[in-house]
Image (cartoon, grey):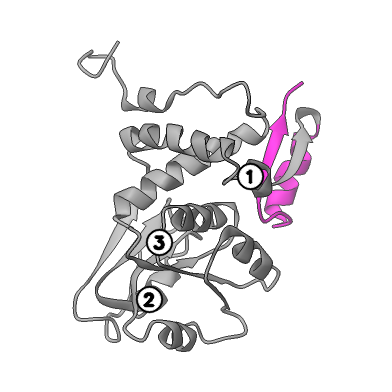
Amino acid sequence: MGPGHPEFWDAYYTQQVLPKDIDPVDGVMVITFCEVLAAIRNFGITEKSSVIIYGAGAVGLTFIKLMKLTGVRIVIAVDVAEEKRADVADAGADFFINSRRESVQKKVREILPQGADFVLDAVGANSLIQEGICLLKENGQFCVYGICPAKDVEFSWAEAPRNFSIRYLHMPVKEQQAAAFPVIIEWVREGKIQLSDYISHRIPFSNILDAFQMVEANQTKKKIVIIYK
């Protein structure tokens, strides 16, 4: 059954077989890497770009890693937790800004006087739009990855560049996600990506409620994998 079939669904593009030489527990991260690489390409981020990324959780770190692997010129990571400084450095970020301790706008203008080509929200907070658009250069793009809890947003563009755009990517384009799969597998095999670096806990299914409690208590900053035996 292919694209011309009436029952074809584009999600079929993403159904891939994990190679046997990749640990299936670590392999759950392949999905995230494929989605993120597809998003980078969809947003139009290239090796010439300068990018500010808000959030250094598992998804944010994945963005940083892949942007540097694809040759993005400058990546500035922003997070509220100082312990993330080492994580973003390991992922390849060029700069880290602790938004609780420093003025993001001041630090960004020291690094990029004209502003950034892209500001990317990997947190899922509409409030970042207000701050982020003021960090863009002329014709820059604010990118939202994923779905924000609040469906309404208000912001002022008084301090924004004269021309800018806001782009939401709520769902990866399935063909792009599928095209990313062989690239990610190659990078894993070459040792450029260590999937286990993005997993903080491996919890057996019998203790699955512990995983939900950890998420609700914000006790984990990376992925939790549920193991079935």
The disc at residue 194 is: 1
State the residue lying farthest toward the front: 190
Q: Is residue 226 magenta?
A: yes
- 35 horizontally vs 65: left or right: left
Amino acid carrying label 1: it is Gln
Judge by depth and name the residue closer to the eye, 223 or 96. Answer: 96
Amino acid carrying label 3: it is Val
The disc at residue 123 is: none
Q: Is residue 203 magenta?
A: no
Judge by depth and name the residue closer to the eye, 72 or 146. Answer: 72
Mark found first going from the N terminus, 1 or 3: 3
Residue 73 placement (x, y as % from top left)? 40, 66
Closer to us: mark 2 or mark 3? 3
Question: For the residues marked 2 and 3, what is the alpha-carbon distance in whole angstroms?
Answer: 24 Å
Residue 186 placement (x, y as % from top left)? 50, 35
**Magenta region:** 207-229
* Residue for point 71% across, 54% down: 220
Residue on which disc 2 sits: 130
Residue on which disc 3 sits: 72
- 182 horizontally vs 87: left or right: left
* Residue for point 37% across, 79% down: 135
Question: For the residues marked 2 and 1, what is the alpha-carbon distance in whole angstroms?
Answer: 34 Å
202 relative to 101, above or below: above
Residue 170 appears in the picture as rendered: no
Question: For the residues marked 1 and 3, what is the alpha-carbon distance in whole angstroms?
Answer: 19 Å
- 11 horizontally vs 79: left or right: left
Local SS, label 3: loop
* Residue for point 41% across, 58% down: 71
Local SS, label 1: loop
Local SS, label 2: helix
